[in-house]
Amino acid sequence: MYQNLNQKQACVFYAIRDWCIQRVCGLNPDPFFLYVNGGAGTGKSHLIKCIHSEASKILSRLPANAEEADISNPTVLLTSFTGTAAFSINGSTLHSLLKLPRSLKPPIQGLGNQLDEVRSELMNAEIIVIDEISMVSKPLFAYVDARLKQIKGTQRPFGGMSVLAVGDFYQLPPVRQSKPLCVYDPEQIDLWQEHFQMITLTEIMRQKDDVAFAEMLNRIRVKEKTDELSQCDRDLLSQAVTAPEECPIEVLHIYATNKNVESHNTDTLKKLHSNIIIITADDFQKDKRTGRMAGRDKPFTGGRNDLPDTLNVAEGARVMLTRNLDTLNGLVNGAFGILIKVVRSENDGHIIKLGLRMDNRQSVRSNRSANAASDDLVYIERAEESLKFKGAVRRQFPVKLAFACTIHKTQGLTTQTAVVSMKNIFEPGMAYVALSRVTSLSGLYLQDLDEKKIYANPEVTGALQTMRQASFEEMMPLLQSLTSKAPLLQTVFIWTATPCSNATDMCPTQTFLTWPAEVVVELLCI
């Protein structure tokens, strides 16, 4: 796994590896606050997995930080803003891990009775990795800082933990937020500018077989609004332009707005399926006379609810989950699948379950063991939501049609083919995110090409240009030695003194932790 790292990835990997070794040796290095920047497909997720594996292995040698902490609890926390990204790195969402409220309005809420439980689970943690950092708002980041301080029982930044933030601020910012996290805002708490340093990954790993497409993505990622596309890039994109009637109907369609998505989903459902099933929400409201919850004959209509009053679906239709049901096993908000089976009650024919064939096969194994299912389907039940009407509750399936989805919803998605429409793009970064979802130019079907819609956020450009750069110059000799064929140089030595007779003496890895910190020598074989 580590052998596939390119030079910049390796710089980050070995720097954090060295920090972990110093931490285990009792040298007490200061916490690091590092931002790994990079465009779509530059191997950010792969780097996270490598760092997590190696850092966890090394830091597991630390004694438990408290009597109530289990030595088996994680030392490296993998987190992300969305369930989709969290699943891709085998992590958790920030909200679920740190028990954050949905509303981030001040004042910051404490953990209350949950504090001891969460503290026990996370007390051993030394590093927190936050993937998809561009989706994290300033209020959420401040909440993470406050929560870690509470859990660790210290007022040091982020509770004294090291933070590895990973992502691409040229992608989409937090929905309904004014400024990306990296852009200074005098009206918000700014933990970013004060603490973080940046290193940028530039080598695209995803599209190695389509170099021209990869180079174009790098250019449009940072393109200014007033700049024109180069003739080379214009010609390349023109190759992907496809008439609507020539676009494959079964391929995911990506649009800028919910209105375009809903229109395409409705039209495609009618074209492909004749037996449309209407699933009505079960709404309940407190009876003023009895004080008990009573079912309504018809659901409430209107309002901005997570769960719709009616769902129009069909067996065989493409659908998407709209809630995180099981992040660990990929049943997350934004996960795609096909509706295969509608399960009705034997008593009254009421729809009680939906059987989905998820694109992610791991979900099947988890669901089968949990529900003793004999097929390859994931069965989901109705979820519950409190409505704005006083005392009203809705029960409905957390799914929606997914022949198409918005650009925002595709962030973090990788697909071989997609139909991308640039119609109604309304903010910087949207075109770049949409175009970079596919792995090659041959898999891109482009509609409504408008180069004026391709531009980056100038505030992000300015913020990243002034951000402090992380220096890993001390890692370069080490990296060069790793490429040497000489047996001696295939070995990495880390020391602060020389207790052995010479640097090539074999000092057993198993015993080095018993040595005083000032005379630690560990032999780490690559």
Image (tube, helix red, strand yellow):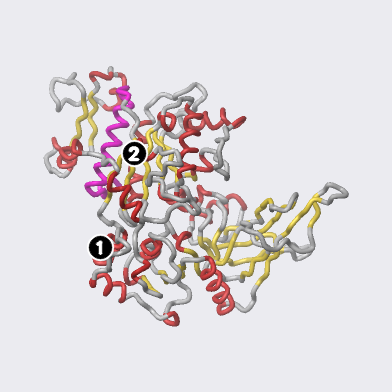
**Could you say where residue 2 lies in the image, as x and y percent from the top left?**
28, 45
Helix or strand or loop: what does disc 2 sit on? Answer: loop
Determine which quarter of the picture holds residue 478: top left
**Could you say where residue 407 lies in the image, as x and y percent from the top left?**
45, 63
Stretch in magenta: 1-28
Query: What's under tag 2, amino acid-wise?
Result: Phe
Residue sitting at x 45%, y 43%: 138
Q: Residues within 10 Å of mark 2 (few under 14, many from 20)?
A: some
Give the mark, 2 or 1, whose residue is nearer the N terminus: 2
Query: What's under tag 1, amino acid-wise?
Result: Glu
Residue placed farthest to the left in the image? 486
Q: Which residue is mark 2?
A: 196
Cα distance between the residues tagged 2 and 1: 28 Å
Q: Nearer the viewer, mark 2 or mark 1?
A: 2
Q: Which residue is mark 1?
A: 215
Determine which quarter of the picture holds residue 220: bottom left
Left or right: 159 as drawn, with respect to 231 = right
Residue 249 shown in magenta: no
Q: Are marks 2 and 1 in contact (CB under 8 Å)?
A: no
